[in-house]
């Protein structure tokens, strides 16, 4: 289709760019095809900052497509089901990539090409093949700052990977969601104490493979290192700020491990799925008291892991956690600013107490929640509220769609239109990878 010259209002390019940055990918594509000016502006790198391009291995992309990505200075790519020859094309076309995700790796030849991406700092590998241990080499990727390895199965020996990861001393974020056996625990302990810049850690603690031992976050002693032929730890104190534990059944950490986690600001505990999760009753109050800098706590499944919130906690997110009125009152906190209750399957009875329990809330998410009209109006007493997420409350029989819209209009008037109300699904809260949805 031929492109025409723009005959509308002549605005400064900076103003057009601000507008275009608010559009979806599809909307940008539609606008781009209307005239030469918009095509030129939409291909500006400023329009695509922090955008990840998804490439499919079964699609043949034209030279013009690759040239367009170059113009946009594409820095982040997710490749789905690609073969090694596709990666050679990607390497040749976009050599300056800084973030690369492969989901899944279905061709062993891809592993040999990873070291050629010399500017990649963030690497995500989802493995779907019988990878020979000798081929899974990462120690040459010492420029990485973020590494995620997901779904590496037990038939791939973990020693090769973990020893390689220990050499990546620039890592700030490490995600290991792999089905390993208990022998990997000591190597895991060795690895995290070889990474001086590590701030974020996410591990899958599948009960059928790897158990979270009390000393899982304690350094190996010199004798233990000598016994398994490893150098002594180069880090004496962990500096972790974010920790995710997926597929937990229990959390029992020794004093040394808790001391090593004292810098944590965010803790996410994801209990294993299944019927047994409903009966988990783990008391982490003593653990939370050992984390003086913790400001964010997230839990998925099971029963609530604490009897009271730490005084310094600012953000609490509960997903599919069993709740009742007594539990809710235990959570009362004058410091809490962000609360999310997502599919919390039980009877909380009433939201009327929220303004008294959480007087300083700025954001409130009550997804898939049973709520009456009077309770909704009562939330207007939250004086500091800035955002209210009420996705799926319209499915409750007590509120029709028309009634909900009327309630929202009244709520906006009461709150002087200063509260953003979200009614459409946003991306679900997730951990470091899709393992959190299993």
Image (cartoon, rainbow, N blue to C red):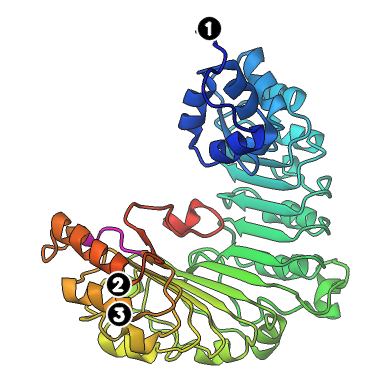
Where residue 283 sits, quadrant-wise, is bottom left
Main SS, magenta residues? loop
* 261 w.r.t. 434: above or below: below
Q: Is residue 262 left or right of residue 206?
A: right
User: Residues in magenta?
Assistant: 389-393
Label 2 sits on residue: 414
In magenta segment, residue 266: no
Depth check: 415 or 254 in front? Answer: 415
Location of residue 64 in the rendering, given as x and y in whole percent from the top left corner:
64, 14
Residue furthest out toward the front: 9
Q: Earlier in the sequence, mark 1 or mark 2?
A: 1
Depth check: 125 or 312 in front? Answer: 312
Q: Is residue 105 visible?
A: no
In magenta segment, residue 390: yes
Residue depicted at x 24% and y 74%? 377
- Report helix, strand or loop for mark 3: loop
For residue 31, the mark is: none
- Spatial CA span between label 3 and label 2: 29 Å
Residue depicted at x 77% and y 69%? 190
Depth check: 208 or 315 in front? Answer: 315
Label 3 sits on residue: 323
Q: Earlier in the sequence, mark 3 or mark 1?
A: 1
Where residue 78 sits, quadrant-wise, is top right
Label 1 sits on residue: 2
- Spatial CA span between label 1 and label 2: 51 Å
């Amino acid at each position: 289709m031929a492109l025409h010259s723009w005959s509308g209002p002549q605005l400064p390019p900076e103003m057009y760019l601000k507008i275009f940055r608010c559009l979806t990918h599809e909307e940008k594509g539609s606008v781009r095809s209307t005239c030469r000016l918009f095509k030129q502006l939409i291909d500006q790198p400023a329009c695509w900052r922090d955008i990840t391009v998804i490439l499919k291995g079964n699609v043949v992309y034209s030279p013009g497509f690759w040239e367009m990505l170059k113009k946009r200075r594409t820095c982040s790519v997710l490749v789905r089901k690609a073969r090694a020859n596709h990666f050679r094309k990607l390497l040749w076309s976009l050599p300056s990539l800084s973030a690369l995700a492969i989901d899944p790796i279905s061709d062993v030849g891809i592993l040999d090409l990873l070291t050629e991406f010399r500017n990649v700092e963030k690497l995500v590998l989802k493995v779907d093949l019988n990878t020979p241990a000798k081929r899974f080499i990462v120690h040459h990727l010492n420029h990485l700052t973020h590494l995620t390895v997901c779904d590496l199965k037990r038939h791939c020996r973990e020693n090769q990977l973990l020893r390689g990861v220990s050499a990546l001393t620039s890592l700030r974020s490490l995600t290991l969601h792999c089905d390993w056996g208990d022998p990997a625990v000591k190597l895991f302990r060795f690895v995290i104490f070889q990474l001086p810049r590590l701030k974020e850690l996410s591990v899958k603690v599948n009960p059928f493979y790897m158990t979270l031992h009390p000393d899982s976050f304690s350094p190996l002693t010199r004798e233990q290192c000598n016994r398994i032929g490893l150098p002594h730890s180069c880090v004496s104190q962990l500096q972790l700020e974010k920790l995710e534990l997926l597929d937990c059944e229990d959390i029992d950490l020794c004093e040394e491990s808790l001391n090593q986690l004292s810098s944590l600001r965010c803790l996410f505990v994801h209990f294993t799925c299944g019927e047994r999760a409903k009966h988990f009753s783990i008391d982490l109050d003593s653990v939370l008291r050992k984390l003086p800098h913790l400001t964010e706590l997230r839990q998925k499944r099971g029963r609530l892991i604490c009897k009271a919130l730490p005084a310094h906690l600012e953000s609490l997110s509960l997903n599919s956690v069993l709740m009742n009125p007594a539990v809710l009152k235990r959570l009362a906190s004058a410091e809490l600013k962000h609360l999310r209750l997502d599919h919390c399957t039980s009877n909380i009875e009433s939201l009327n107490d929220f303004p008294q329990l959480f007087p300083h809330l700025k954001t409130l998410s009550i997804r898939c929640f049973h709520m009456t009209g009077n309770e909704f109006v009562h939330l207007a007493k939250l004086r500091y509220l800035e955002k209210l997420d009420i996705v799926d409350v319209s499915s409750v029989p007590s509120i029709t769609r028309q009634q909900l819209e009327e309630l929202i209009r009244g709520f906006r008037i009461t709150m002087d239109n200063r509260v953003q109300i979200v009614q459409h699904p946003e991306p679900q809260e997730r951990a470091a990878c899709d393992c959190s949805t299993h």
